[in-house]
Image (cartoon, rainbow, N blue to C red):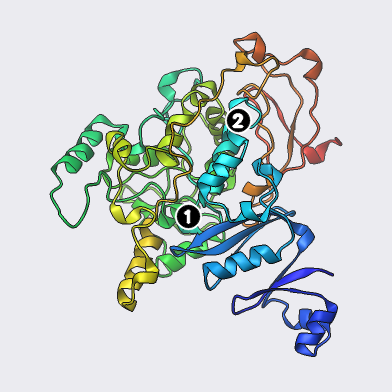
Amino acid sequence: MSLFILRSFGRLTETNDSASEMSTGLPHKQILSYTEGLHGKWLFTEIRAVFSRRYLLQNTALEVFMANRTAVMLNFPDAATVKKVVHSLPRVGVGTNFGLPQTRRISLATPKQLFKTSNMTQRWQRREISNFEYLMFLNTISGRTYNDLSQYPVFPWIITNYESAELDLTLPSNYRDLSKPIGALNPKRAAFYSDRYESWEDDQVPKFHYGTHYSTSSFTLMWLLRIEPFTTFFLNFQGGKFDHADRTFSSLSRAWRNCQRDTSDVKELIPEFFYLPEMFVNANSYNLGVMEDGVVVSDVDLPPWAKSPEDFVRINRQALESEFVSCQLHQWIDLIFGYKQQGPEAARALNVFYYLTYEGAVNLSSINDPMLREVSLQVYILFHIMLSKVFDAISKVKLAPEWHGRPKLTIYRQVPPLPSFIIHSHHFQLRHTRYTEPCPKATTQDTVLKRKTQRARPQPNTSLTTSPICCRRQSASSKAN
């Protein structure tokens, strides 16, 4: 039996029956019995991908993705140990799901090297993968992970209309302008940030537009407050208490208004907004308090056009996969992962953040003062560090559907199953769905489904699918495939 054991002091070793007995004098089974609950153990054959990661500002971690759709993040004493561990593992690389070769060199590659080597951008351009999948790919290779709240995946706000009873996804006015950062969407607020940047005169602190960030551990906990383990994390973060009711995430409409008006609120979203309806439900009946206007905080108030949390997630995901978003998503990607992340282009795009939030601004290894080192870590944990740029050039544009000889992904087609690298073990196992009605006619011939394909689709091997706009959802347990 080949496996590796993460010892309690951080050492990762391969073991088998004879090796363990020689090193400890104890039978192999007795070792595993003794370490149950104290050590993690995984078969080499379970590994599907390995990525190098930063942890607390140091390049000392690995994230290992397993066949059962879980991911384990391991931190080591130093970067040299990380290399030794990677070279001691089988040739698993980063997995074909990422369009990358399976080599140890790729597991230690930088985000830019991963992006350059992968074919995922070309697949996205050709509409072979969805917008959701492509954003998850960029988040993953940039170093963002579900296993670290301070480096959590980030997604854009898409919809701007949270007040109407009906939502028309063909109207551009219902979509956010993805060419601008969230702080620049409101002209008055954009003028405030621009004025701050131009009038800044501190010699010690470089100019910036935003003193806060679009993604922090506290924001992630705020979004996911109602589900475990995030409820426990939030309470630990808040000293054992829930936050004031008026500051609690209680309404999608209010959350959108705040990030358009409040000069200290430039939050973007997280992936769960596009696949996890449970995050909007206070299923455990937590006492989240009463707001000053007397409203009791419980479930998240949905926009009128969403009849249920599942309905909101479905429509939000459809908006993400719409043609309107597809033709401008590359501009938001430039702001978060690309050439507008920092430097002169970031300044022109109104996209400069406080200097300590950028990668490389703090070098912990050069800080000898324990107190200063602790302060630097707290800044990182609370306010986030911008992760590496994935590319320096202008990102590529998704090709129009009529450029291809066969129908590709559109909002009228089934969104493909979420790949295994985005489903983490802390999420609920969501109910499978399948489809029994045809989709509506699209506006062009290339996006029309042929009649012969308009039948019940087989249930995918995944925890979630998203239904088209008009399809009737049916529990997979009620009918055989």
Q: Is residue 40 above or below residue 63?
A: below
Residues at marks 1 and 2, CA–CA distance in whole angstroms = 26 Å
Mark 1 burial class by Cα count in 10 Å: few <14, some 14-19, many 20+: many
Quarter of the figure with the C terminus: top right
Residue 308 appears anywhere in the view: no
Q: Which residue is mark 2?
A: 122
- 354 to the left or right of 153: left
Front label number (1 vs 2): 2
Q: Which mark is residue 151?
A: 1
Task: Report if the CB atoms under discs 1 and 2 are less than 8 Å apart.
Answer: no
Q: Residue at x 42, y 42 (%)?
A: 268
Q: Earlier in the sequence, mark 1 or mark 2?
A: 2
Q: Position of residue 359 (x, y in %)?
A: 39, 54
Q: Position of residue 337 (x, y in %)?
A: 45, 41
Give the quarter of the image for residue 76. bottom right
Position in image of residue 248 (x %, y %)? 40, 52
How many tags in the picture? 2
The amino acid marked with disc number 1 is Gln
Query: In the rendered image of this protein, does residue 83 appear above or below residue 279?
Result: below
Q: Quadrant of the N terminus?
A: bottom right
Give the amino acid at mark 2: Gln
Is 16 situated above or below 222?
below
Q: Kindly state the secondary structure of the residue where label 1 is placed.
A: helix
Outermost residue, right direction?
480
